Image (cartoon, rainbow, N blue to C red):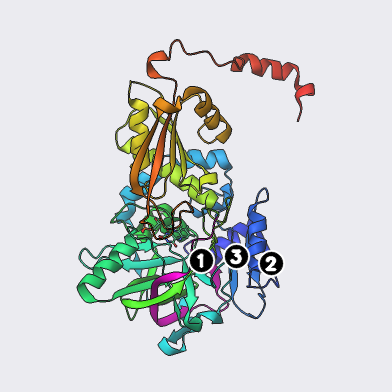
Amino acid sequence: MTDLRTWLDRVEGFGELRHVRGAHWDTELGAIAELSYQRPNPKAMLFEDIADYPTGRVLTGSTGSARRLGLTLGLGDDLDDASLVAALRGKPSTWARTASEFPTETVTDSPLLANVVDGKDVDLLSLPVPRWHAGDGGRYIGTGCLVVTQDPATKDINGGCYRMEVVDEGRSATINAVPGKHGAQHVQRWFERYGKAPVVVSFGHHPVLLVTGGTEVPTGISELEYAGAILGERVPVLLGEHTGLPIPAGSEVAIEGWLRPDLMRDEGPFGEWTGYYSGKRRPAPALEITRLYHRDDPILLGAPPGKPPHDYSYMRTAMKSAMIEDALVGAGVPGVRGAWAHEAGGGRLFIAVSIEHRYAGHARQVGHLAAQLPAAAYMNRFVVVVDDDIDVANLHEVVWAMCTRCDPKRDIDIIDGTWGSKLDPMLVEGAPPYNSRAVIDACRPFERRATFPAVSTGDPDYLESVLNKWAEVLAP
Ligand SMILES: Cc1cc2nc3c(=O)[nH]c(=O)nc-3n(C[C@H](O)[C@H](O)[C@H](O)COP(=O)(O)O)c2cc1C
């Protein structure tokens, strides 16, 4: 179950795969994908016969439904939104705890070895790399990719999903890991010790590697082992001949090579998950590619961001929400009932947490913790803490609680100097990437819980009986 083609067969089997033939790689493919995310029940799209490319395919929308994400996470392919969330509860901490029981399995053979191209002959543009959005600075081969690096001291392996633009007419690609991300830290440590850093990248794989590479798996845990824990089987890998780093053997396309501090190329802008282009074109590290591997008629896993909902916003919301809830419970805070990293904020900017309000100061404690958890700290902007009668996943209810249980002067704390990003549309060009965030206590004041005005909706049991009696007039 660790390769993309087996996964595609399963998705085709339950009717959530569309084949799209004849789209152009230059914005048309991206526009079709974007339109599909904005419609109800978006399908996965497999683009074939792409203009100018008799072979090579692109997949989008891989994790955009409960059934596809459930399949990807080994939780079942018959889930709906609510049962997916229920099935995910508690899972991230279990996967983190058991990851070391699933070391990668080194193999020597793989369909990936069907085509091996060395150094000077590498041309990434021999593949149908899309220009996703009209304002993108170039063609991005890395959206749903897995960038594999290693800590030179501890030997820990990391797999991160960082955007990659093709440069130098196809001979290289930039890697845009935000400082502080694990991959960026590994590369920095290699530069300090050895003046260069080995890197492997897979561009087409089972979407579990997009999920693990693209979410904040705790420091020191290999995303390949974490993926093994999710699937309940070890991930087979080839060892890169030039770098020694693991390459997922089920990959469709992979490269290996070296980053060097002085090898920089301009990259960007790119339509990002905030819903805005990411500022100006500026230098980023470019990979000296020593080898390209690909299967016949390979499939690139696309995951283009954009104004939410976008390609992976459903997956990010589901995963982040489960991780944040798990981390709060794991930190020992009592009374946490639910957490939701809303899709409108790209799964990062707006987090709601519900609690059973147990003591004075409880809501603030939960809010401040949530705002700084490793799973949430990067690019958060608002954390709202609500009582447990509010459905955290329902934006309407969360905003109602903010409007009616929160006195802005007293109940909003601002934390300054926090972990922002150069992607932030509010960041002034050239300023350091800090941001600030608001922790909003939208719980009824603890000392007034008994006397706070009662909510004016009917008693649920009474409403249920009325609904049964008046079903005809209330039918949708
Ligand atoms: C499709 C996709 C694209 C992403 N692009 C970037 C990126 O360009 N730079 C970045 O730092 N993080 C990016 N992220 C977020 C990181 O993948 C995420 O923060 C992940 O936890 C990084 O791995 P790490 O924690 O091991 O560094 C992207 C995520 C996804 C799903």
Residue 328: tell me if it is visible.
no
Query: For the residue marked with disc 2, what is the amino acid?
Result: Val
Q: Position of residue 361 (x, y in %)?
A: 32, 25
The magenta span reads 276-301
- Residue bearing mark 1: 269
On the question of residue 413 being in view, the answer is yes
The prevailing secondary structure element of the residues shown in magenta is strand
Q: Nearer the viewer, residue 401 or 186?
A: 401
Q: Amino acid at mark 1?
A: Pro
Q: Looking at the rendering, in which quadrant would you find the C terminus? A: top right
- Mark 1 lies on a secondary structure that is loop
Direction bottom: furthest residue: 120
Residue 133's tag is 3
Q: Residue type at mark 3? A: His
For residue 443, above or below residue 192: above
| Whether residue 303 is situated above or below residue 255 in the rendered picture | above
Instruction: Using a 10 Å C-alpha cutoff, classify the residue at mark 2 as few (fewer than 14 neighbours), some (14 to 19) or many (20 or more).
Output: some
Image quadrant of ligand 1 equals bottom left
Residue 243 placement, left or right of 464: left
